[in-house]
Image (spheres, grey):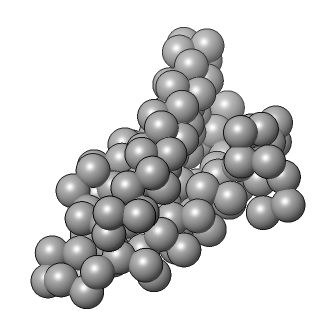
Amino acid sequence: MTQNQNLKPFDLEDRTLNFAKRVRNYVKKLPRTISNLEYGRQLIRSSGSQAANYIEANESLSRKDFFLRVKICRKETKESRLWLTLSEPNSEDTREQNELIQEATELMKIFGSIVEKGK
């Protein structure tokens, strides 16, 4: 990522894609324990799913479909945060774990706000 990590992309499609990429790189560095292998698989799936569902939300055919997709984004991001919390990184990767948990929390709040504004 060429952009400073502290600067958040305004475009949510880019931001969710970057989150999924960062998660992928994080999972690659996790110690190969039985629990990390399973948590890593689940984490890769949920982070990719939130990115894919946001793209689909932007291509939705109706307002109802848009909000359904955004709700799925929020659910998948919440799940990603769970798997991040359960994963056991090397001591040098705990900072990345915390940053990803923070990003997941921020994305959840954004998706929640979108859903609330749609009510």
> Left or right of 111: which side holds 5?
right
Q: Is residue 108 above or below residue 46?
A: above
Q: Is residue 46 visible?
A: no
- Where residue 37 sits: x, y (%)? 25, 81
- Where residue 6 sits: x, y (%)? 71, 39
Name the residue: 24% across, 65% down: 88
**The image quarter in which residue 94 lies:** bottom left
Relative depth, front residue between 84 and 58: 84
> Left or right of 85: which side holds 76?
right
**The image quarter in which residue 110 lies:** top right
Name the residue: 18% across, 83% down: 33
Relative depth, front residue between 72 and 18: 18
Q: Count how many numbered circles sit on residues in the image.
A: 0
Location of the N terminus (image quadrant): bottom right
Q: Is residue 27 above or below residue 1?
A: below
Q: Is residue 73 visible?
A: yes
- Where residue 30 sits: x, y (%)? 35, 76
Name the residue: 45% across, 51% down: 95
Location of the C terminus (image quadrant): top right
- Where residue 15 sits: x, y (%)? 71, 48
Name the residue: 56% across, 19% down: 113
